[in-house]
Amino acid sequence: MASATRATPDTLPAWQTLKQHAHALQNVHLKNLFGDDDSRWTNFTRQVAGLTLDLSKQRWDDDTLEHLLALAHEAGVPGAIDALLSGKRVNVSENRPALHTALRLPADASLDVEGEDVVTAVHESLAQMECLVQRLQAGQWRGATGKPIRHVVNLGVGGSDLGPLMVTHALADYRPKGRHPLEVHFASTMDGSQLADYLGRFNPETTLFVLSSKSFTTIDTLSNANTAKDWLLGRLSTHGDQPSAAPLSAELIVRQHFIGVSASPEKMSEWGIASDHQLMFWDWVGGRYSLWGTIGLPIALVVGMDNFRELLAGAHAMDCHFRDAPMEDNLPVLLGLAGIWNVNFLDIRAHSILPYDGRLEYFAAYLEQLEMESNGKSVTRQGQAVNYSTCPVLWGQLGPNAQHAFYQLLHQGTQPVVCDFIAPLKRYDEVEDPDTRRHLKAQHRLALANCFAQSRVLMLGDDALDDEGPRPEHKRYRGNQPSTTVLLDKLTPFTLGALIALYEHKVFVQAVIWDINPFDQWGVELGKKIATDTQAIIDGEGDISRMDASSRGLIGAFWASEQE
């Protein structure tokens, strides 16, 4: 990344130029920037890896982009890209690389990181994962009583949950045909509500749990895992539905019903997971960047290893583009610069993610963690407090549903919001029945019409309407809301991989310019520590007098409820 002694971004010459430029544009409506210039689409649209990135509806012009590119150069973005992809220690607070991109390098590649070729280890872990996937998909993995596994429950939280959940839902159409029936489920909530539902419905003899935790100390995941273990031991120790049979050992039950995925093999072994049922990843992979490796086991179980490797190939294609494309044609750089312009110069602090495809239902939630956990920072890489805005607040929902919910605020509220519209161009070609295919393709066209119309109205406001008659104020629309549209040729494992990598690298570009570390999460770690201390007090093992009045009152209310 950039030098440790670099100037803060707000003192860079290009930053000062952009401040003056923003002042000159502040009263220029987006509809006037767009005008009737057909070349604007060409000037602000780029294509790569099955994606089309349309930035023409951003509130900027050619001069804006020129100044932003100058800022990227002054902030050291080109050198930072090289440092990231070559394995330098870009995670400065933890003094290690951030090598999620190495997880999607092809097997014939090499990447020497501090004397070790990490590609070999990555593909060894993928080969081990493939063996487990093949056994489960073929119905060859048997539970402790000899029955084939039917349900797999992923126990994880944060990056060990959101990434695999998002991708398995997005690529459900790519389930291999003719395999053993296998259903994958996710439990992340520490209150046990998701897990309780599964334990009430599933047969323990045919249920396998994947315990996914980088550190293997995350209390949310371990509390669910311990509950699942006790459930299995209680139900299977008497041989399931054959209580007269000899009791099964706890070691056998845990061995046949748990897979561990972690960077801490000793903790997995201590918990009881068999060594040949342990999948490894490394401390140079952050949790929110980990779906590309063994944390992606649930993905591979749903779509198969061939499609999982296509997901990696799509991400790698975006990595190569990020490394090789000139800045002015580099999709992650351009998307990142649009965000810098909106946050720091147009003062737009809210960002909505709006996919127009039901398969991308969890994409907004995934990006919420990716961006806000990465760039929700207020301290520079040198440890100084920032005096400029960093990450905006992200939220989102499926666009067709959001149109009936919070789009009212987008169109007529007082809060400026930048929106990302995401949609595939083609869908339902593979549906065999002609009538069903025709109806579904019509529905897809309807979704695209809404997607394109909403970004148009957000840009133009009243000018998007054909009628010229006067309207009362409550029926007027100001427009001038910037947006980005990302089109996928078709939603496939390859294009989804490219899409995710596009946003990963966008986050990195913005972090470089803001001079913050996107690869740590000390605020999250603080929350975990305070929660552990509070749990001890709730359990009567700590000093409640150290707590504030509100916390004492809340804990007291809980204690009182237990006495009722």
Image (cartoon, rainbow, N blue to C red):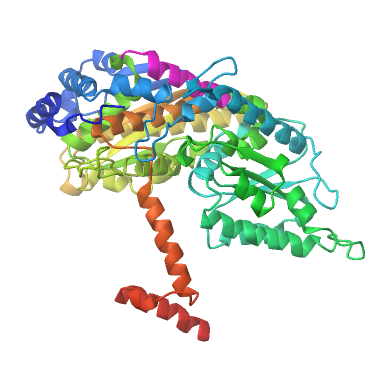
Q: Is residue 306 left or right of residue 114?
A: right
Q: Give the percent coordinates (x, y) of residue 279.
A: 64, 38
Residue at the bottom extreme of this rendering: 564
Q: Nearer the viewer, residue 222 or 381?
A: 381
Specify start and end residues of the magenta stretch as a single range: 310-326
Residue located 30% across and 33% down the image: 511
Q: Nearer the viewer, residue 226 or 62?
A: 226
Residue located 49% across and 20% down the image: 112
Q: Give the percent coordinates (x, y) of residue 321.
A: 41, 16
Q: How many marks?
A: 0
Above or below, comparing residue 167 to residue 328 in the picture: below
Residue 421 sits in quarter: top left
Above or below, comparing residue 385 to residue 492 in the picture: below
Q: Is residue 170 left or right of residue 326?
A: right
Residue 123 sits in quarter: top right
Residue 324 falls inside the magenta stretch: yes
| Quarter of the rendering occupied by the N terminus | top left
Q: Nearer the viewer, residue 301 or 117?
A: 117
